[in-house]
Image: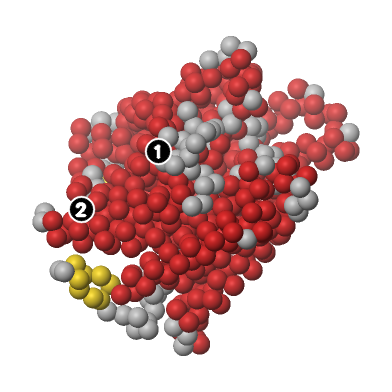
């Protein structure tokens, strides 16, 4: 293998990594707030991708144009899921929490299949198309735009969590629920907000991915699994660290494909999850 | 009526009557389809019971049990294909392989708790699935046909004329799973497992060897699941990674147990008796359209159960009984 191929792989891995990071950030935020893993996260992503697809197919809106709408739609959906389902299982045993979101995942996936069929769809001729070549390295423009977009969304999220008062209240709730309540923070509202923001992140990621990725009911499964790996790497609940973690997942995926075998790349990434949670359960940057 | 149900005599009589009805079923229903539905119920009740041993009694939510199912299915099929061994021997070897695999997986994974454990089992399942797809000697992604043996015989565990023998073998496997679960439930091990489920640290502080008992529960669970896998291979006569190793199968096994009520002896059978016919009927009425209506209903049911009564139908029944009694 030449160095050129390796650099090409690293660049593509890095670009995808930013998108993984954005998906994982929503998951991590929700987990940090209420220790619930959203097993329907991949299906949220699938929903966002379908929303983008239909906006393109029916309304002739480019994925980049419909992106704000998709984000808003997903945020509303996150609120709906919180008030319709999650709120009722906050105090329930972990088993009920796992299966509530699992049931939601199965339901959403089946609903997509019932409504739109299992066909693979693709947004043809998006606004940004083609590729550029930099010093012998080819970069797909949609991929580039997607990763830059994901990075911007991540920056926005970071700014919101760290610099705004609501963001600080979110952080306080995730650090110590009781203390936050005593400080006058409405933790229920923070939970709902967490689901809205978490879903909005996936909404942005889905809209960006829809520019170049096939869209079908099961599309979320792989992305969700990669997001769990990224969340574990960054440390459950540590949102900023998921940026680094997402990039690592993206690069490991590509390197696994290049150095071992393309068919085994996901096995390599999932092994990474096991290695991380066993030897460093607090994540790469976490402190216990 | 409530106190009556607590009398052991009445309970055992009810169980006996149920068993007689199940034994008589294929004599009344001679068509293949009703028999197939009940065979599938038995199979999934058995798999859910195996999962229940680990998840229900010991509290370890595994979402990767398809690994053991596939281990059973592949071991018996490969031994039959390459070494011409009887599926019964293959079944036994499959159980041993599954136990070995379960101990290998369990050693690192049981150090994790809660969500970390659940996601780790999904990761293991996906890794094994990927490896099997790429393992050419074992059929790879194309899968394996079980070598056809004629004439029908018990030794070959193949019956091409009627499903009756499959029916009784599935019932036998189900009874085995029930018997083992019952044995565990009333034994010292059963109390240990429940103690671990309720509070692992408290159990450890009382001197229960937590890690060893988790491994034992996992081994029992894996062996039973593998038996189901070998039976499935002999019944369907074709296996591939997509049918015996997918995460979707692991999830379906859990759903059956969760709907019926986990940590109870009868929950898995009740769950299977509801979910499997539901899946069959929706497939008949909405079938051929690829509309996944069965999954739509499963998903909604599981959300409902989680919100209303995480203990499943068994807990609902007990609550009702307490009210009337």
Marked residue chain, label 2 = A
Which residue is at the front of the view, B131 or B283?
B131
What crowding class fits label 2: few (fewer than 14 Cα within 10 Å), some (14-19), or many (20 or more)? Answer: some
Q: Secondary structure at mark 1?
A: helix
Pointer 2 and pointer 1 on the same chain: yes
Marked residue chain, label 1 = A
Q: CA distance from mark 2 to mark 1?
A: 22 Å
Of marks 2 and 1, the one in the foreground: 1
Residue beneath disc 1: A276
Question: In the image, which disc is placed on residue B105?
Answer: none
Residue at left offset 20%, top offset 36%? B82
Q: Position of residue B194 (x, y in %)?
A: 63, 24
Q: Quadrant of the C terminus of chain B?
A: top right
Q: Position of residue A180 (x, y in %)?
A: 72, 46
Which residue is at the front of the view, B33 or A53?
A53
Q: Secondary structure at mark 2?
A: helix
């Amino acid at each position: 293998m030449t160095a050129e191929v390796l650099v090409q792989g690293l660049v593509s891995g890095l670009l995808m990594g930013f998108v993984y990071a954005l998906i994982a950030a929503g998951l991590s935020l929700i987990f940090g707030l209420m220790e619930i893993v959203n097993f329907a996260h991949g299906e949220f992503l699938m929903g966002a991708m379908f929303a983008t697809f239909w906006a393109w197919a029916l309304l002739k809106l480019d994925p980049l144009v419909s992106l704000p709408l998709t984000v808003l739609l997903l945020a509303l959906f996150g609120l709906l899921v919180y008030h319709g389902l999650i709120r009722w299982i906050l105090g329930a045993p972990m088993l009920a929490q796992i299966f509530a979101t699992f049931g939601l995942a199965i339901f959403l996936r089946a609903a997509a299949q019932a409504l739109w069929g299992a066909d693979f769809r693709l947004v043809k001729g998006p606004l940004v198309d083609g590729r550029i070549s930099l010093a012998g390295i080819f970069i797909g423009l949609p991929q580039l735009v997607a990763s830059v977009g994901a990075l911007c969304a991540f920056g926005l999220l970071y700014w919101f969590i760290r610099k705004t008062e609501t963001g600080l209240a979110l952080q306080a709730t995730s650090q110590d629920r009781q203390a936050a309540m005593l400080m006058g923070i409405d933790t229920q509202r923070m939970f709902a907000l967490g689901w809205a923001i978490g879903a909005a992140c996936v909404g942005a990621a889905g809209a960006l991915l829809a520019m170049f990725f096939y869209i079908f009911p099961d599309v979320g499964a792989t992305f969700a699994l990669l997001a769990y790996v990224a969340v574990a790497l960054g440390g459950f609940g540590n949102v900023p660290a998921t940026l680094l973690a997402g990039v690592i997942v993206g690069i490991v995926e590509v390197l696994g494909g290049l150095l071992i075998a393309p068919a085994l790349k996901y096995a390599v990434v999932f092994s990474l999850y096991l290695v991380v949670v066993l030897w460093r359960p607090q994540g790469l940057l976490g402190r216990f | 009526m409530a106190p009556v149900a607590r009398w052991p005599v009445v309970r055992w009589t009810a169980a006996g009557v149920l068993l007689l009805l199940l034994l008589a079923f294929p004599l009344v229903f001679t068509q293949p389809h009703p028999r197939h539905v009940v065979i599938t119920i038995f199979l999934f009740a058995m798999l859910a019971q195996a999962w229940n041993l680990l998840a229900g009694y010991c509290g370890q939510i595994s979402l990767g049990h398809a690994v053991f199912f596939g281990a059973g299915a592949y071991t018996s099929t490969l031994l039959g294909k390459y070494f011409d061994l009887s599926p019964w021997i293959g079944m036994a070897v499959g159980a041993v392989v599954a136990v070995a695999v379960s101990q290998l997986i369990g050693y690192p994974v049981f150090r994790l708790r809660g969500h970390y454990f659940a996601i780790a089992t999904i990761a293991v399942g996906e890794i094994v699935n990927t490896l099997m797809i790429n393992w050419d000697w074992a059929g790879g992604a194309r899968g394996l046909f079980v070598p056809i043996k004629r004439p029908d015989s018990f030794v070959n565990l193949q019956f091409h004329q009627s499903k009756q023998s499959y029916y009784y073998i599935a019932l036998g496997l189900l009874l085995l799973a029930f018997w083992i679960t019952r044995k565990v439930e009333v034994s010292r091990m059963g109390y240990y497992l429940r103690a671990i489920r309720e509070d692992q640290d408290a159990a450890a502080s009382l001197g229960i060897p937590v890690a060893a008992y988790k491994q034992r529960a996992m081994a029992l669970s894996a062996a039973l699941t593998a038996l189901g896998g070998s039976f499935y291979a002999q019944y369907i006569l074709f296996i591939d990674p997509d049918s015996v190793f997918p995460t979707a199968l692991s999830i379906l096994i859990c759903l059956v147990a969760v709907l019926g009520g986990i940590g109870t002896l009868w929950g898995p059978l009740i769950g299977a008796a509801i979910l499997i016919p539901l899946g069959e009927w929706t497939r008949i009425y909405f079938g051929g359209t690829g509309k996944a209506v069965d999954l739509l209903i499963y998903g909604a049911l599981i959300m409902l159960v989680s919100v209303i009564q995480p203990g499943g139908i068994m807990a609902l029944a007990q609550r009702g009984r307490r009210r009337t009694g």
